[in-house]
Image (cartoon, rainbow, N blue to C red):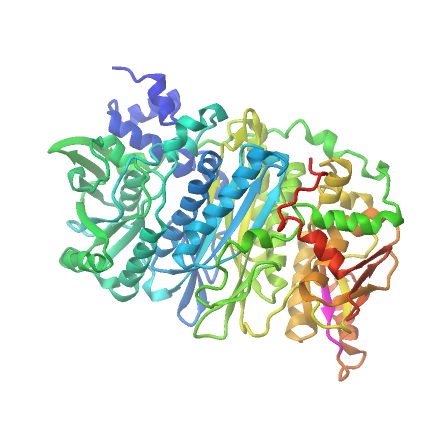
Amino acid sequence: MPVTQEALDAVALSREEYALLVQQLGREPNEVELGMFGSLWSEHCGYKNSKPLLRLFPTGGDRVLTRAGAENAGAIDIGDGLCIVMKVESHNHPSAIEPYEGAATGVGGIVRDIFAMGAYPIAILDSLRFGPLSSAQNRYLFNGVVAGVGGYGNCLGIPNVGGEVFFSTGYDGNPLVNAMCVGLAETSKLVSARARGIGNPLLLVGADTGRDGIHGASGLASRTDPEARFEEMRPAVQVGNPFMEKLLMEACYELASEHGDWIVGLQDLGAAGLTSSIVECCAKGGVGALLDLDQVPRREDGMTPYEVMLSESQERMIVIAKREHAADVAALFARWELHCNEIGEVTEGREVVISSEGVEVARVPVDIATEPPEYTRVGVAPAYLADLNSFDLSALPDIDPGDATAALLSMLARPNVASRRGVYRQYDQQVLNNTVVAPGGDAAVLRIAGTTRGIALATDCNARVCYLDPYVGGALAVAEAARNVVCTGASPVAVTDCLNFGDPTRLDVYFQMSQAVHGISEACSVFDTPVVSGNVSLFNQTGDRPIYPTPVIGILGLIEDVSHRLQAGFTHPGCDVWLLGSSVEQPAASLAASEYLESEHGLVAGCPSVDLQAEARLQRLILRAHDESLLQSAHDCSEGGLAVTLAESAMLGGAGFEGFVEVTGRLDAGLFGEAAGRIVVSVVPDIFRQGGGSGRMGDLARSAGVPAVRIGRTNDSGAFRFGPIDATIPDLIEAWESLVRGEVPASIR
């Protein structure tokens, strides 16, 4: 009987893909097999529209311990026999439908990816994007997502140490929820996701299997659906139990760290559930499997084999145990009050054979299932780019000097600039007692217990820049992430990415994705930060309008001595303040893609740029100056421009600031332009050094070829003065904490 279009739509397979599947199988797939192939060939699992582009990323390096995409996450050697395991993933579509559960299970899924490798999760970061808060629906999504991230993560006892929150009409109806998790492991005790050893048992541990999440991978995450269908799609959103996950996390870590010789592999059940976990484990190990679905514990009666194989019920893991230690593994999980059921075994033949009630219900060749068709297109630049890139920003009226103070206070109250304390105070930041620099600065810093080392973590992406130039936006996401960890005194060493785009079958969207990937690739090569893991989330759009292209970068930096770290705030009076990377005067072009341009003129326009070599010189300069103990603080100059950066440094540290340079040229560009590649530092007075600390800072900048200008000095007056701006720190804080108070500025568009 020919397959119906309705059946193909349910599993997000095209008619052409189905024909290819039949050709490769040599027969028509049955219902269970069709569901399995639909999930495994989906964009979410198979990366069929993105894999050719992902091959452009630099992935190797002296510290890299895993091949990108080969395991659940990427592992990076940090010395002393230890490694960091990290990855970022999306849960965008589920969060658009059910924000609390979508965000909560997004956290749960990325955490399982980390402890599946034998690492103990030590930090969570989240990169969140929503439509403007003037919309009740966007406020509902924002509040639900933030509550879900905190509600799940706090129960696990993992600190949430950083991330981003951004608001734009580009995300109306389609929020982005990207969660990053970082774990710590002994390098010798890393666990693979490979199935090996003929006859070894496949043990399903954790929660019982229900009907939640069916078609989560092939449906929600791999096609575009109208908002009108959201209610009927609600069952496709997984439901989480963080307390079960906490038990599972502790049990799996004990198994990997203390009894690694009992097992050969460990794999979480995420997208596509049993289907993906079993088939991918077999593919990595070059083996097959025999599954008996009668042995799968269920929490609902009457579940079909189709539902059991595609369920995305949370808090489940597959353990590939050594046969002689199966009872030991089961006893360990029983001690944690977790189910552990043998549901099958490893076989020869590279086929997954599934039975139910004594009858074979599916036979899936591993190689066909894990090699979906790949699509490469020639992208076409979006039609809007020509007009927006050629827009004459110099024709816009400049700000009046008398309005500069009010303009700064207005900028500080903007949701994209305002303090995120109202968000991160809902998260536990200090649990595990390793958080050295908590949320609110450029990057989080954690100590590595038992060593002098520390790590710095950040996520970044300026989606407005990506909208105007996806190549520059991709490169800038890496550059700014690296800049952020450098501002803590850390050296960037590795990247994980989450590529969020619209429908890749549209040539303008494919252009955005392709250009962004090329930009990321070049920047990672310049900064020597290989891409060790990542995720792709496509089909993000509302109606026929795709989201802003949003390639989120998560970055890891290393600090040799965590006690010798930098902070973003001006904490000491009497320090000279320098702008490194450019002069104060800026052309109108620096307003491109800026928060000021959108807030004051209602425009997202211009032609943003980035100089990666100049960025690299700047970052090397910061690390050199920090090594010489010249710096008291360092703060990345990005959203809001120089005036906002200086104000943030004053608010974060408490010291006042008095500028002594004139802001020449266009006032709006000098104060609020967002030219890339700039850092504001405060330099400690050094009476024992000829010329003082500032003299040495100037010498280092000249020898590094980095523009540098001394722009002011910190003080204990409580005042903030820069150019025509004259305010007090309490004035700044009152504006900056608007989002904490739940206020929505009337100027939001």
Classify 34 as above or below 66.
above
Give the residue at x 69% y 70%.
571
How many numbered badges does the structure rendering display? 0
Classify 140 as above or below 694.
above
On screen, residue 573 versus residue 215, left or right, reads: right
Classify 710 as above or below 9.
below
Give the residue at x 73% y 36%.
605
On screen, residue 435 versus residue 281, left or right, reads: right
* Quadrant hosting residue 101: top left
* Quadrant hosting residue 510: top right
Q: Position of residue 157 (x, y in %)?
A: 41, 59
On screen, residue 647 versus residue 364, left or right, reads: right
Q: Position of residue 730 (x, y in %)?
A: 74, 60
On screen, residue 87 versus residue 421, left or right, reads: left
Q: Nearer the viewer, residue 648 or 269?
A: 648
Q: Nearer the viewer, residue 677 or 175?
A: 175
Q: Position of residue 360 (x, y in %)?
A: 15, 31
| Secondary structure predominantly adopted by residues drawn in magenta | strand
Q: Nearer the viewer, residue 103 or 349?
A: 103
Give the residue at x 72% y 63%.
650
Residue farthest toward the bottom in the current orientation of the protein:
688
What quarter of the picture does the C terminus occupy? top right
In magenta segment, residue 434: no
Can residue 400 be seen in this snapshot?
Answer: yes
Region in magenta? 681-685
Give the residue at x 77% y 83%.
687
Q: Position of residue 343 (x, y in %)?
A: 18, 44
